[in-house]
C-alpha cells in the first residue's frame, strides 16, 4: 500500500521546501498565509505614510505623512499624525488619521515618532525635527521630546545631551525610559548611518553620553530606524547591507543573556548583541522596508515600505511576526511607593537585578508611581531605597508566567527618624535683588500657637524654636506632631508688598535628599510695592461684557510679563478650552505718561504680545481679535503708582459672536513685517554643513528666509500633486520622507493621545 500525505503534512512539506529555497540564498521565506501581510488601506493615501509607531496595546498608531491638511498646509512637508484602533481584539479597524497639531508639528519636517506611557498615565513622545528659531537645536535634524498631559502636548524640548551638528534622528525610547536608541551619521561610527544608544542617568536627571551599538549591529552600510521592544531585549532595525532582499531590509537582534559588566555604559558593546537576522520574505521586498515596531504581545509588527502595488510613495503595513523574530514574553510590574501611615508619594530609587545584571530607575514624583517591563522565565530581586527611609527588598518570581500580564505591587516605606531636642527655623527676609531686610513680622505655629505672635530676630534673622525630644518622648511621636503643624509668617515693610507665607513644618524639615534637618533655613522674598502685584488676574472683571482676565505690564514694556511662567495666561486657555466656540478679544491699554501716539502704539503691542502667548498655549489665531486703546480708557486715576500700574494692562474677553468694527489692529500696527525680500527658492543650494540622509537619500534644501507668511488655518491647498508610484527596479527610490522646510503655521487643537478619547 502506498503511503499517503495528510493536508497538515503537505503544508509542513511545502513550508520546509520554501524555507529550503530561501536557505540557498540566505533569505528566509515565510508562507503568505503565515505572514498575514496586509496594507493598512484607510491609513494610507496617494502621499507618503512613513515611520509608523504602534502603541504596545495596538490601540494607537503614530506616523508621519506629507498628505494635505497638515499643521502648516504646505506641499511636501511632513507632519506627525495618529489614528485610533476601534477594536480590542482581532484585525485592527482604524479611524481616519488626525494631525497631532501644534506645538508638536512645525512648518518644517516633523517625523520619526516613538512613545512611552509614563507611570502617571501621561505619555512622552520623542521625535525628529529641524532646529528652528523657536525650536532650539543645531541646523540639521535633532531629537525632541514632548509630554501629553491634561489633554494637550507640551512645547517640544531638545534632547541637548544627544543632538550634534550632524543628523541625529529616528529615536526609539525603551518603555521603562532607561535607554534611547537613535540613528546618526556622527563621527565614530562604522558606516554612513549607525545605531547609537544613550542611557538615562536618574540621579543627574539627564541622558548620558551616547555610545555606538557596535560592529555586531552596525556595518559600513547604513543602519537606521531602530525599534526596541517592550522586553528591552529585542531590537528591530533596517539596513541596506549586502545580502538582503533589496533596498533597506528589516533585521532583528537580541541582547545576550550574559551581559558583560559595564557594557551598557560604553564598554564592550561587541559581545552584547546576537548576530542580526534578516526577516526574509515577504516582510522584505526588492524596495525599502523600514521602521518596524512590534506590539507588546509580540504577535504583530507594523512597518513602512515603498514596495510595488501600494497606494503612495511609502505605505504602512501590518504583518504577523515570524516565530524566529518574536520578542520575549513581557510582564509589567507597576505600583506606587509611598510613606507608611500616610498617602505621601516618595521619589525612590528602584534597583532590579537578576543573575545576568541589574538596572536602576526612579519613581515618578510627586505620586511615587513606577512601572517596569520584565520578561518571564526569570526571578528578579527589587530593592527600593530613599534617603530617610528603611530599604525594602522584594522577590518577583516570573518563571511560571507564560503570557503577558500586569502585576500590581505597591511599596510602603517607613522613616528612619533621628530627632534633636528642638527644631530651629531661621527665617531670612530679602528683596528681589537678594538684599537682606528686617520687616515687622509675626508668626503662627498651628495648632500649638494659633494667634499672631511677634517674630523675634537674632542677627537679622527671624527665629522660631519648636520643641522636639525636649517635649516628646519618642522620635515617632515628635514626627507625628510635626506632620500636623503649620508655620505661617506675615511681614510688612514700607515700600514693599505685604507677604504671607505658610508651610508644613515637616516640609521645612525635609532636606533635598529626604533627610530630616534640625536647623532649617527659610528665605522669604519681599517684592517692591509695584512688582509684587499679580501679572495676570483671573477675574470676572465685567461679567456683562465677558471679561475673563487682566494682564499687567511694567512701565514702557510690551514684550513680556514679569514672572511670566507663574502668570495666568495658561489658565485663560484652560477656561477657553471649556467653550472653544467663543472668540477671544484682547484690548491693550497704557497709562498717560507718554505721548498719545506712543501710548496707542504701546497698547497695541501689549495686545499683540498677549495674543502670541495665547496662540502658543493653544488658542487658534483666527479666534483672537486684538485692539489698542492707548490711554483713552483708564481703569484707575493716573495720579499714583498703583493707579498707573492698573492702567498698564491688557484685558481679555470671551464673546460667542464676532463684534463688528473690531479689526485686529495690533496685528496691523505692532506686527508689521520687515521690508519685503525676494523669497528664497525652494531649490536652494545645499548648506555646506548638511550631509546625505540615508535611507531617504534626498537632501533637504536650505531653510527659507525668516519672513513669516500669513497663517492659513483650516484651509486646503489649491492643488496636491499625485504621488508617483515606486519604480519597479530594486533599490530605486522615487520619493523619500524628507522635504524642504517651510515656515511655521498657526496652532490647531492638539488631539488626544493614546488611550484618551477624542471629544
Image (cartoon, rainbow, N blue to C red):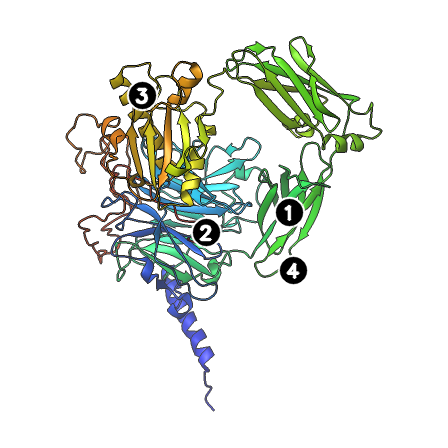
Q: Nearer the viewer, residue 401 or 216?
A: 401
Q: Earlier in the sequence, mark 1 or mark 4?
A: 1
Asked if the residues shown at circle 3 and circle 4 are in contact, with their CB atoms under 8 angstroms apart, the answer is no
Q: Earlier in the sequence, mark 4 or mark 2?
A: 4
Asked if the residues shown at circle 1 and circle 3 are in contact, with their CB atoms under 8 angstroms apart, the answer is no
Q: Earlier in the sequence, mark 3 or mark 4?
A: 4
The residue positioned farthest toward the left in the image shown: 678
Q: Nearer the viewer, residue 675 or 727?
A: 675
> Which numbered dot is residue 400?
4
Quadrant position of residue 188: top left
Task: Report which residue position mark 3 lands on.
Answer: 631
Task: Report which residue position mark 1 lands on.
Answer: 354
User: Which is in the foreground here, disc 1 or disc 4?
Assistant: 4
* Mark 2 residue element: loop
- The picture places residue 612, in percent across and down from the top left corner, at 33, 32
* Mark 4 residue element: loop
Q: Is residue 348 left or right of residue 169?
A: right
Q: Is residue 665 left or right of residue 747?
A: left
Amino acid at each position: 500500500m502506498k503511503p499517503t500525505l495528510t493536508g497538515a503534512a503537505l503544508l509542513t512539506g511545502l513550508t520546509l521546501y520554501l524555507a529550503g529555497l530561501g536557505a540557498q540564498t540566505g533569505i528566509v521565506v515565510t508562507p503568505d498565509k503565515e505572514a498575514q501581510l496586509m496594507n493598512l488601506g484607510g491609513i494610507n493615501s496617494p502621499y507618503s505614510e512613513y515611520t509608523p509607531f504602534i502603541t504596545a496595546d495596538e490601540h494607537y498608531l503614530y506616523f508621519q505623512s506629507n498628505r494635505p491638511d497638515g499643521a502648516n498646509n504646505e506641499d511636501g512637508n511632513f507632519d506627525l499624525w495618529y489614528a485610533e484602533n476601534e477594536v480590542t481584539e482581532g484585525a485592527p479597524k482604524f479611524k481616519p488619521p488626525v494631525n497631532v497639531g501644534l506645538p508638536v508639528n512645525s512648518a518644517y519636517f516633523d517625523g520619526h515618532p516613538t512613545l512611552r506611557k509614563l507611570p502617571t498615565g501621561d505619555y512622552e513622545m520623542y521625535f525628529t525635527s529641524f532646529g528652528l528659531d523657536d525650536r532650539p537645536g543645531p541646523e540639521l535634524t535633532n531629537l525632541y521630546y514632548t509630554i501629553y498631559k491634561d489633554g494637550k502636548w507640551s512645547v517640544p524640548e531638545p534632547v541637548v545631551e544627544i543632538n550634534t551638528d550632524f543628523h541625529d534622528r529616528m529615536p526609539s525610547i525603551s518603555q521603562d525610559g532607561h535607554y534611547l536608541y537613535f540613528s546618526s551619521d556622527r563621527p565614530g561610527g562604522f558606516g554612513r548611518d549607525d545605531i547609537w544608544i544613550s542611557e538615562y542617568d536618574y540621579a543627574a536627571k539627564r541622558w548620558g553620553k551616547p555610545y555606538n551599538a557596535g560592529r555586531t549591529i552596525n556595518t559600513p552600510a547604513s543602519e537606521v530606524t531602530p525599534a526596541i521592544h517592550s522586553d528591552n531585549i529585542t531590537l528591530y532595525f533596517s539596513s541596506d547591507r549586502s545580502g538582503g532582499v533589496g533596498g533597506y531590509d528589516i533585521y532583528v537582534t537580541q541582547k545576550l543573556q550574559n551581559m558583560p559588566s559595564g557594557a551598557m555604559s560604553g564598554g564592550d558593546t561587541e559581545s552584547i548583541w546576537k548576530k542580526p537576522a534578516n526577516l526574509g520574505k515577504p516582510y522584505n521586498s526588492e524596495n525599502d522596508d523600514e521602521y518596524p515596531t512590534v506590539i507588546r504581545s509580540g504577535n504583530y509588527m507594523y512597518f513602512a515600505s515603498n514596495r510595488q502595488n501600494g497606494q503612495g510613495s511609502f505605505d504602512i503595513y501590518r504583518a504577523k511576526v515570524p516565530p524566529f523574530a518574536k520578542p520575549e514574553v513581557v510582564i509589567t510590574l507597576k505600583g506606587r511607593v509611598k510613606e507608611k501611615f500616610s498617602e505621601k508619594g516618595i521619589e525612590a530609587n528602584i534597583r532590579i537585578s537578576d543573575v545576568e545584571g541589574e538596572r536602576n530607575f526612579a519613581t515618578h514624583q510627586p505620586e511615587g508611581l513606577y512601572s517596569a517591563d520584565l520578561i518571564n522565565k526569570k526571578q528578579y530581586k527589587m530593592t527600593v531605597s530613599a534617603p530617610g527611609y528603611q530599604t525594602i527588598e522584594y522577590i518577583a518570581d516570573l518563571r511560571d508566567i507564560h503570557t503577558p500580564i500586569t502585576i500590581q505591587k505597591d511599596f510602603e516605606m517607613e522613616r528612619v527618624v533621628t530627632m534633636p531636642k528642638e527644631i530651629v527655623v531661621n527665617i531670612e527676609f530679602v528683596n528681589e535683588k537678594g538684599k537682606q531686610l528686617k520687616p515687622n513680622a509675626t508668626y503662627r505655629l498651628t495648632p500649638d500657637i494659633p494667634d499672631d505672635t511677634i517674630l523675634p530676630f537674632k542677627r537679622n534673622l527671624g527665629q522660631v524654636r519648636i520643641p522636639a525630644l525636649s517635649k516628646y518622648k519618642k522620635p515617632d511621636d515628635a514626627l507625628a506632631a510635626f506632620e500636623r503643624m503649620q508655620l505661617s509668617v506675615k511681614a510688612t515693610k514700607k515700600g514693599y508688598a505685604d507677604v504671607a507665607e505658610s508651610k508644613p513644618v515637616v516640609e521645612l524639615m525635609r532636606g533635598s535628599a529626604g533627610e530630616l534637618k534640625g536647623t532649617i533655613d527659610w528665605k522669604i522674598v519681599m517684592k517692591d510695592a509695584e512688582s509684587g502685584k499679580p501679572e495676570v488676574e483671573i477675574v470676572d472683571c465685567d461679567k456683562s461684557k465677558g471679561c475673563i482676565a487682566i494682564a499687567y505690564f511694567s512701565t514702557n514694556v510690551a514684550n513680556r510679563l514679569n514672572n511670566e511662567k507663574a502668570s495666568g495666561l495658561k489658565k485663560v486657555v484652560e477656561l477657553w478650552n471649556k467653550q472653544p466656540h467663543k472668540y477671544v478679544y484682547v484690548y491693550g491699554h497704557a497709562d498717560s505718561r507718554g505721548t498719545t501716539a506712543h501710548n496707542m502704539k504701546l497698547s497695541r503691542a501689549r495686545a499683540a504680545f498677549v495674543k502670541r502667548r495665547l496662540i502658543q498655549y493653544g488658542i487658534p489665531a483666527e479666534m483672537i481679535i486684538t485692539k489698542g486703546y492707548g490711554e483713552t480708557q483708564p481703569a484707575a486715576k493716573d495720579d499714583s503708582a498703583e493707579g498707573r500700574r492698573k492702567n498698564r494692562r491688557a484685558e481679555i474677553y470671551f464673546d460667542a459672536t464676532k463684534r463688528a468694527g473690531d479689526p485686529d489692529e495690533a496685528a496691523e500696527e505692532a506686527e508689521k513685517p520687515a521690508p519685503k525680500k525676494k523669497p528664497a527658492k525652494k531649490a536652494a543650494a545645499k548648506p555646506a554643513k548638511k550631509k546625505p540622509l540615508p535611507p531617504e537619500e534626498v537632501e533637504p534644501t536650505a531653510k527659507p528666509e525668516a519672513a513669516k507668511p500669513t497663517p492659513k488655518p483650516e484651509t486646503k491647498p489649491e492643488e496636491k500633486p499625485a504621488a508617483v508610484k515606486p519604480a519597479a527596479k530594486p533599490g530605486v527610490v522615487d520619493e523619500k520622507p524628507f522635504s524642504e522646510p517651510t515656515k511655521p503655521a498657526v496652532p490647531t487643537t492638539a488631539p488626544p493621545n493614546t488611550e484618551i478619547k477624542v471629544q
